[in-house]
Image (cartoon, grey):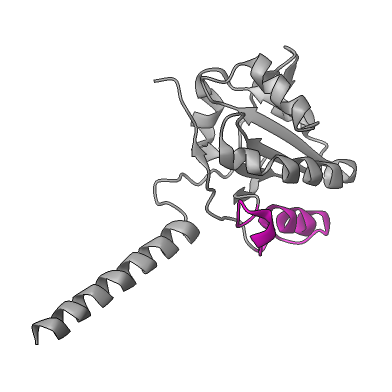
Amino acid sequence: MYKKLFAAIILLVSILIVLGLTLSKNSIPPEQKEIRKVANFTLKDYDGKSSSLYDHKDSKAIVVVFIATQCPISNDYNGRMAEIYKKYKDKGVTFLGINSNKQEDVDEIKEHAEEHKLEFTILKDVNNKIADKLDASVTPEIYVLNSNFEVLYYGRIDDSRNESKVKSKDLENALNEILSGKKVSNTRTKAFGCTIKRVS
């Protein structure tokens, strides 16, 4: 009797653990604020050139991606970010990388971008002010905006850091729908990656 009861408890615990892992991977965290529209901001790139969000009001879509130089998960996406940029840059889509990690300086960001052929603009978010405004928490993390700077898609680039296991290209799906004049069918996914290292 006790053996059957113990076995039942073990089975129940296993089910709860699997269910918990599934929810944590696919659900949107309740503490994540819903950002409907992004206010203008101005940051400098790794060469010291200023760039403002509202400079890109003529874009069909603006992809804001929080990235890092030292995060292994973000680095797994370097090739994909470079390819997605090349695929959409001539279609009216602007890409803005933002580095908010306190320990990664502009020299490191520039060297990292050149090494991994990240040709889109990468801005340094000193004191993580923009990360705080958007409630960004990990790298990589994506916000896709329209020309009115409304958020049309938020979340991950795709569903696996292992490119060979990707089943859902969420960012590309959203961009394809936007460029086709369609409403984004999946507006939010759960971003995953390394925690942004903020100034305390």
Name of the residue lying farthest toward the left: 2
Residue 115: % across, % down: 76, 28
- Tell me which segment is drawn in magenta: 158-185
Residue 190: % across, % down: 52, 53
Tell me if residue 140 can be seen. no
Q: Is residue 168 magenta?
A: yes
Lateral position of residue 23 relative to residue 34, left or right: left
Q: Give the image quarter of residue 10.
A: bottom left
Q: Is residue 26 above or below residue 44?
A: below
Name of the residue lying farthest toward the right: 90
Name of the residue lying farthest toward the bottom: 1
Q: Is residue 194 magenta?
A: no
Lateral position of residue 37 relative to residue 121, left or right: left
Name of the residue lying farthest toward the top: 48
Figure disc tally:
0
Q: Give the image quarter of residue 124.
A: top right
Q: Quadrant of the N terminus?
A: bottom left
Q: Is residue 200 above or below residue 21?
A: above
Q: Residue at x 53, y 25 (%)?
A: 101
Between residues 45 and 152, which one lies in front from this camera angle?
45
Residue 108: % across, % down: 65, 19
Between residues 117 and 40, which one lies in front from this camera angle?
117
Q: Give the image quarter of residue 54.
A: top right
Q: Residue at x 44, y 64 (%)?
A: 22
Between residues 110 and 66, which one lies in front from this camera angle?
110
Q: Quadrant of the C terminus?
A: top left
Tell me if residue 94 can be seen. yes
Q: Residue at x 71, y 17 (%)?
A: 46
